């Protein structure tokens, strides 16, 4: 036996789904149709991304004369659009800025959410109920109504046009959801596990680190993906708050600007857009086994 | 309440749900604060000590295994918290795994274990700490019937081997009877009676203990004592007369509750009374019958095969040597 104490949860395999779907006897026919319908839906949903990819790979002349599907009929591909996008549109810089916004935002949201949720579930302090209610209130507050006062405040404090300013805004407005989501999950961790840890002599901090964090990993991954996507896809906040910055514009702002111009043609825009889609796509796919488990894990404690 | 547990004894706290037995256990463990009194383990007063310093180990009803830790890590966690050297932890875990037959499972996660194995891991976590006291909180109630009987034996033999003082909480009186050196029957936060299992069975101090210990439960019949020339008899409300043990110091006319265990109802013989059978439940080794004796429903358990059908009448009589008499108001034992 080993005396090292592995902390990791081994990769959960999503086989349970594959097994349970076809085994329902008389309803197999209906289920098969349902599966077909879902697959058709997924294909339909994926079409725009396919169109985007194909368009970004077609020569400019083709794009002007025929639809994207012709790329499947008469294949002729070029990397020219990507080179143009990276070279003339400074897409690499934009992607960099977007990452510089999204990654710290995501890390902060996940970390602060799990700490906040733990405190709300496990710790007794004055005003806990009030704080929980405030959280719900913040959940239903539309961020738009805060834009004007916050922008003025930012200008006053010199936060406008800085990346930390965007972190602050996005973290602030994702945190209520994050705490809300994780609170539901942490509340489902059986009371006995905490008592067990208490009996075992673990301190509060130790319990948090050795019990709560590893157990919450799936839901934290889910929250991380969502926080990243929201931050990455956000146009409004960077558009308003990054004005006057010397840095490359975030990808969403850059793309939105490009749509307005027609001089560059569609090709480089498609290439740039595809790049902006590809990064979150890779992230979601690589973390999706956690994502699925995280959603289930929040609903029923396995 | 006051309870003194000698070193090495296996004590079972038993009682209906809500009687305070789990709370008492959690107080000993330190999970529940106490507002008064003293809890002493060995010579040490532990009232205000945190659980980890009380030198106790507790096994929870639902095992409370850390789902993200292997069996070995689960068992070693408390030792790691106590900053024990790694080799020492490994040794202790190995020894406990050996005792419990968990050697092949040390690297598995709890979800890959069966119920019985999880139960063993939960016990292993307690064993590695080598505590002064084991506390069990209904550890078998999540297992199926067959496994429960098997684990009962294992816990018992583990106790015989380790000789660690054990406090075991259960609501199952059979578990209490089979495992305990001493049973403490609790009711509404008080001790109803404490004693060796068979003492409680043979001489229950009150109707509560009498009804709680033993399955099926003791029959209780209301009525009064009449002293006849042949000796005292019990006259149940409704008229039938039942025999008493001769020489009981009970005055004429006193109202009593007549208690009789199902197996002390005998078939046939002198002084038998007719009883109408309402329900027969043969289990093979014995037959249980619910019948109407006078105005009361009584339950009898017979070693003999009883070939009656529901609705028929049989002749039964109580064995006077095993009759219990209780005070109808207080429920306290009279004889």
Image: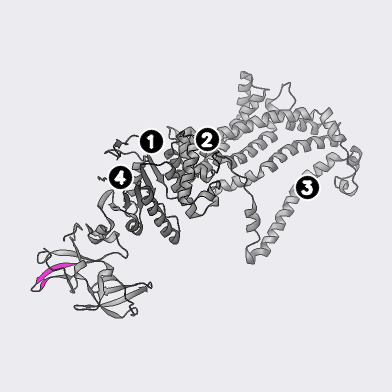
Can residue A120 be seen here? The reply is: no
CB atoms of marks 2 and 4 within 8 Å: no
The residue that label 4 is drawn on is: B7
Report the mark closest to the observer, 2 or 1: 1
Crowd band around label 2 with a 10 angstrom C-alpha radius: few (<14), some (14–19), many (20+): few
SS state under label 4: loop
Q: Are marks 3 and 1 on the same chain?
A: no
The residue that label 3 is drawn on is: A47
The residue that label 1 is drawn on is: B53
Q: Position of residue B37 (x, y in %)?
A: 26, 39
Tell me the number on the disc at residue A209.
2
Give the residues drawn in magenta, as a range.
B223-231
Q: CA distance from mark 2 to mark 4?
A: 37 Å
- State left or right for residue A264 relative to residue A97: right
Report the mark closest to the observer, 4 or 3: 4
CB atoms of marks 4 and 3 within 8 Å: no
């Amino acid at each position: 036996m080993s005396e090292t104490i592995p902390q990791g949860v081994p990769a959960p395999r999503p086989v349970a789904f594959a097994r349970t779907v076809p085994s329902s006897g008389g309803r197999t026919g209906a289920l098969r149709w349902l599966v077909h319908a879902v697959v058709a839906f997924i294909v339909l949903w994926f079409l725009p991304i396919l169109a985007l990819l194909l368009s970004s790979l077609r020569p400019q002349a083709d794009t002007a004369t025929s639809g994207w599907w012709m790329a499947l009929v008469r294949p002729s591909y070029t990397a020219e659009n990507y080179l143009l996008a990276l070279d003339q549109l400074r897409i690499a810089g934009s992607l960099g800025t977007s990452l510089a916004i999204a990654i710290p935002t995501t890390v902060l949201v996940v970390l602060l959410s799990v700490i906040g949720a733990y405190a709300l579930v496990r710790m007794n302090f004055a005003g806990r109920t009030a704080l929980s209610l405030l959280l719900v209130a913040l959940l239903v507050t539309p961020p738009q109504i805060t834009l004007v006062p916050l922008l003025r405040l930012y200008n006053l404090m010199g936060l406008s046009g800085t990346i930390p300013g965007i972190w602050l805004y996005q973290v602030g407005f994702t945190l209520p959801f994050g705490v809300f989501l994780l609170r539901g999950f942490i509340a489902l961790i059986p009371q006995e596990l905490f008592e067990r840890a208490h009996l075992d002599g673990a301190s509060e901090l130790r319990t948090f680190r050795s019990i709560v964090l590893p157990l919450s990993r799936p839901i934290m991954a889910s929250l991380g993906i969502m926080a990243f996507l929201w931050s990455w896809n956000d146009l409004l906040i960077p558009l308003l708050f990054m004005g006057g910055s010397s840095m490359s514009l975030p990808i969403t702002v850059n793309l939105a600007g490009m749509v307005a111009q027609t001089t560059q043609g569609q090709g480089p825009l498609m290439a740039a857009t595809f790049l902006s889609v590809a990064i979150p796509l890779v992230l979601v796919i690589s973390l999706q086994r956690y994502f699925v488990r995280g959603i289930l894990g929040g609903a029923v404690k396995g | 309440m006051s309870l003194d547990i000698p070193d090495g004894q296996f004590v079972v706290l038993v009682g209906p749900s809500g009687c305070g037995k789990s709370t008492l256990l959690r107080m000993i463990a330190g999970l529940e604060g106490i507002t008064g009194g003293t809890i002493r383990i060995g010579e040490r007063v532990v009232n205000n000590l945190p659980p980890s310093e009380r030198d106790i180990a507790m096994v929870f009803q639902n095992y409370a295994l850390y789902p993200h830790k292997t069996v070995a890590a689960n068992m070693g966690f408390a030792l790691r918290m106590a900053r024990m050297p790694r080799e020492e932890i490994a040794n202790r875990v190995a020894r406990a795994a050996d005792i419990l037959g968990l050697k092949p499972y040390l690297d598995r996660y709890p979800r890959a274990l069966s119920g019985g194995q999880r139960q063993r891991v939960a016990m292993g976590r307690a064993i590695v700490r080598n505590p002064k006291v084991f506390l069990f909180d209904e550890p078998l109630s999540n297992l199926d019937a067959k496994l429960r009987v098997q684990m009962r034996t294992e816990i018992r033999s583990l106790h015989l081997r380790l000789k660690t003082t054990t406090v075991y909480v259960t609501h199952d009186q059979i578990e209490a009877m089979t495992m305990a050196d001493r049973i403490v029957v609790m009711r509404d936060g008080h001790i109803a009676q404490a004693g060796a299992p068979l003492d409680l069975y043979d001489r229950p101090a009150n109707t509560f203990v009498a009804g709680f210990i033993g399955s099926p439960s003791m029959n209780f019949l209301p009525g009064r004592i009449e002293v006849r020339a042949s000796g005292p008899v019990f006259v149940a409300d409704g008229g039938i007369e039942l025999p008493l043990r001769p020489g009981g110091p009970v005055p004429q006319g006193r109202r009593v509750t007549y208690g009789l265990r199902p197996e002390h109802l005998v078939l046939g013989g002198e002084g038998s009374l007719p009883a109408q059978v309402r329900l027969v439940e043969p289990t093979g080794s014995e037959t249980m019958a619910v019948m109407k004796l006078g105005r009361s429903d009584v339950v009898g358990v017979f070693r003999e095969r009883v070939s009656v059908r529901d609705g028929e009448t049989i002749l039964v009589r109580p064995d006077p040597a095993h009759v219990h008499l209780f005070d109808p108001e207080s429920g306290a034992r009279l004889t």
